[in-house]
Image (cartoon, rainbow, N blue to C red):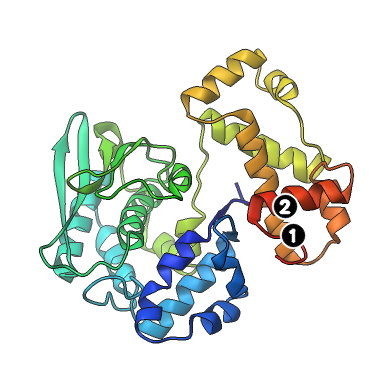
């Protein structure tokens, strides 16, 4: 889903280390094309491109790939070196073990391990005694990077059986549906971890060193935009809705969606409910994210954007955009 956006809460947490070291956070944001006021609005969102530019800028300033959030810096190119170690793994299971051993050598306040769980293995993070971890983003980023690197190596969307987090459910928890590919998330656990099935662990490493060179050229965007061809129903519905919005300038209702997917509307509702979502939620998110991308592009008028998203008049679009982000399109 190329228009997907993320909560600005991630940017707020990403900036905590730079702020603590005395950097001008507003200046950093401005240099990345992010108006500082956006981060003061809890409902605001950023595009992947904005978040990627912010990530690169903070890493450059701090020479720390973990943004100053851990007790010891993770110097620039640490992740690249990890990938060069992983590229020689024969399968996902071996690569996961290499990842765990590599992170332990960093001695950054997190103890990593690969442990047996029912039906597979878990990549687990434990906070070391007296460790300095400024916020949860350091943990989320470590889990996401490890999992998505494995997905890239296997050239497949490796399903996560479950995610364990050692902190309470945050306000932005809805974002985890994208971060962890829809896996069930359990809070206030003893450790942070993601669980992979044995079938995923046995998948071979399909990549070469030439593939790795291309993969590393566009970090971190290659990680945060990684999708592969998801086949779960919510992802299929979201992709279809985006295509209809972009190509047909239509926002179809659930009856039309049901016909497209060969289901009765009630059956579609039930199947989406099993994934803890609804058709209306997916439709709203698709319109919201595409609207944010189009407004940021500054190539179309507000009226034209509203029309493309299926709004009959610009006032309705402006009201919807304010409800989605806390801003009018112009203020955004």
Please tell me the numbered disc located at residue 224. Answer: none
Question: In which quadrant is the C terminus drawn?
Answer: bottom right
Name the element at disc 1. Answer: loop
Q: CA distance from mark 2 to mark 1?
A: 6 Å
x and y percent of residue 286 in the render? 66, 43
- Determine crowd level at label 1: few under 14, some 14-19, many 20+ residues with C-alpha closer than 10 A: some
Q: Which is more N-terminal, label 1 or label 2?
A: 2
Camera-side residue: 273 or 82? 273
Tag 2–tag 1 contact (CB < 8 Å)? yes
Q: Is residue 232 above or below residue 85?
A: above
Relative placement, left or right, of 138 versus 46 is: left
Q: Position of residue 249 (x, y in %)?
A: 82, 42
In the rendered image, the residue lying farthest to the left is 129
What secondary structure is marked by label 2?
helix
* Residue drawn where x is 59% and y is 58% of the image: 44
In the displayed structure, does residue 215 sit left or right of residue 128? Answer: right
Q: Residue at x 52, y 66 (%)?
A: 51
Give percent across and percent down for residue 85: 24, 63
Query: Which dot marks residue 321?
Result: 2
Q: Is residue 157 left or right of residue 6?
A: left
Residue 179 rendering spot, x and y as whole percentages:
43, 48
* For residue 135, above or below residue 27: above
Query: What residue sits right under mark 1 in the picture?
Result: 328
- Closer to us: 118 or 135: 135
Residue 139 in which image quadrant: bottom left
**Does residue 280 appear left or right of residue 223 in this picture?**
right
């Amino acid at each position: 889903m190329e228009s997907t956006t993320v909560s600005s809460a991630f940017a707020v947490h990403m900036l905590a280390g730079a702020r603590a070291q005395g950097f001008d956070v507003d200046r950093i944001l401005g240099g990345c094309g992010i108006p500082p006021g956006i981060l003061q609005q809890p409902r605001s969102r950023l595009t992947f491109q904005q978040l990627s530019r912010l990530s690169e800028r903070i890493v450059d300033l701090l020479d720390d790939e973990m943004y100053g959030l851990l007790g010891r810096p993770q110097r620039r190119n640490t992740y690249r070196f990890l990938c060069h170690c992983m590229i020689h793994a024969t399968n996902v299971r071996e690569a996961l073990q290499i990842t765990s051993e590599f992170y332990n050598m960093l001695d950054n306040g997190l103890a990593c391990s690969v442990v047996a769980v029912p039906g597979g293995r878990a990549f687990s993070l434990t906070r070391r005694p007296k460790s300095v971890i400024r916020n949860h983003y350091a943990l989320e980023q470590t889990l996401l990077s490890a999992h998505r690197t494995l997905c890239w190596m296997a050239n497949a969307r490796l399903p996560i059986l479950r995610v364990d987090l050692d902190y309470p459910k945050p306000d932005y928890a809805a974002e985890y549906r994208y971060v962890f590919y829809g896996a069930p998330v359990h809070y206030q656990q003893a450790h942070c971890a993601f669980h992979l099935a044995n079938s995923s662990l046995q998948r071979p490493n399909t990549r070469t060193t030439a593939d790795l060179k291309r993969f590393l050229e566009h970090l971190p965007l290659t990680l945060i935009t990684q999708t592969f061809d998801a086949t779960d129903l919510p992802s299929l519905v979201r992709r279809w809705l985006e295509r209809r919005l972009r190509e047909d300038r239509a926002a179809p209702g659930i009856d039309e969606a049901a016909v497209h997917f060969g289901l009765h509307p009630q059956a579609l509702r039930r199947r989406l409910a099993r994934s803890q979502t609804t058709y209306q939620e997916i439709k709203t998110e698709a319109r919201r994210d595409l609207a944010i991308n189009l407004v940021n592009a500054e190539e179309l008028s507000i009226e034209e954007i509203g029309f493309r998203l299926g709004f009959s008049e610009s006032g309705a679009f402006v009201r919807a955009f304010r409800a989605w982000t806390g801003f009018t399109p112009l203020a955004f």
